[in-house]
Amino acid sequence: MRHILLLGGTTEASALATALATRGEHAVLSYAGRTDHPRAQAIPTRVGGFGGIEGLAEYLTREGVTHLVDATHPFAARISANAIAAAELAGVPLLALTRPAWEAGPGDRWIRVADTAEAVVALGTEAARVFLALGRQTIGDFGHATQHFYLLRFVDPAAPPALPHHHLVVDRGPFTLAGELALLREHRVQVVVAKNAGGSGARAKLDAARALGLPVVMIDRPAIPDRPQASSVAQVLDWLDHRVVRGV
Ligand code: 3Y8
Ligand code: NAP
């Protein structure tokens, strides 16, 4: 009897969890515990860190996990690196479920940067009205660029960040084009800062920026060591059934 641990926190992880439940698989979805009310899932969930590589390897062995699927967000680089090392230590097969990066299309005005430090530089010194669509964890990196007005969006209410000119919206995706257009217009946004998350859940702000002719400072994904990858739920199910996963 196989037992799957699914590292979640993305739209794709939720879709895979539903597919696993439909098949009656013995599976658990794992959250880090970053949000107050994570989305309910069709399979049992666990919440909280494992305690680094060793903690995750011990969990895999103790719980008798037979397959590890990493369906975390492309910017969750640490858990993904830990999953590679822990799977090796525990002798458990690992497969990542990833989504393609977004690519600039006609009409997009992207300024690609490597990280948030470069994003701050890309914003320039002249005060601007910035939609900082990065969530909460990296807000501190913008603390030296207080000349800008920041429109912020968090999943949960939080203490106001130390940015003198900001407006905080509490909302979770997936977001819509109409909603993003209204938000950008209401706050007279001049530039959007985004992570290249890929997927559909956060894509609408890019389409809205293009429609309004706004520049987007696009942060490229952090590097993650090589591991077997699937790009669809169907490929993960194939892998579980020992069929060769196409494209890996
Ligand atoms: C806790 C689980 C699902 C998954 C939904 C996706 C889509 C909506 C878009 C913007 C960008 C951002 C942020 C975002 C999106 C999906 C997906 C995605 C971006 C939840 C979730 C957890 C988190 C953690 C949270 C981070 C934050 C990042 C907000 C649940 C809702 C900005 C990433 O307050 C905090 O500490 C929040 C932290 C990591 C990035 C950051 O650095 O602040 N996600 N997001 C997961 C856990 O505990 O393990 O609460 O249900 C999941 C989703 N967030 O099943 O429907 O698939 O990408 N999440 C980014 O992409 O830039 C919002 O506002 O435009
Ligand atoms: P991270 O920086 O890669 O991981 C930091 C630590 O958080 C890990 O070492 C691990 O702690 C714990 N952790 C992370 N994901 C976990 C999971 N799914 N289950 C159990 N523990 C987990 O992670 P992050 O970027 O903060 O992302 C945290 C979660 O939010 C992930 O589930 C991710 O999919 C989701 N998410 C992140 C983003 C983003 O922009 N980063 C966007 C959308 C969703 P231990 O070392 O103690 O095991």
Image (spheres, rainbow, N blue to C red):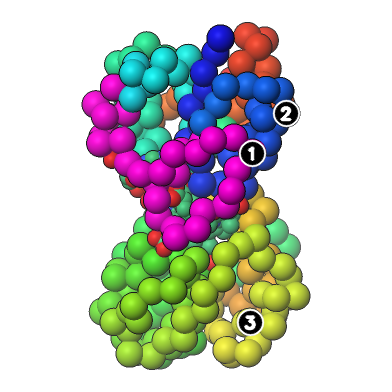
Q: Residue at x 70, y 76 (%)?
A: 179
Q: Residue at x 38, y 29 (%)?
A: 83
Q: Which residue is mark 3?
A: 183
Pointer 3 and pointer 2: residues touching (CB < 8 Å)? no
Numbered label attached to residue 22: 2
Q: At numbered mark 3, what does the secondary structure look like: helix, strand or loop?
A: helix
Mark 1 vs mark 3: give the one in front. Answer: 1
Q: Earlier in the sequence, mark 1 or mark 3?
A: 1
Q: Which residue is mark 1?
A: 42
| 66 vs 37: above or below | above
Location of residue 36 (image quadrant): bottom left
Pointer 1 and pointer 3: residues touching (CB < 8 Å)? no
| Percent x, y of residue 98 | 57, 37
Give the amino acid type for the residue marked by disc 3 in the picture: Leu
Q: At numbered mark 2, what does the secondary structure look like: helix, strand or loop?
A: helix
Q: Is the CB of the residue bearing disc 3 within 8 angstroms of ligand 1?
A: no
| 28 vs 135: above or below | above
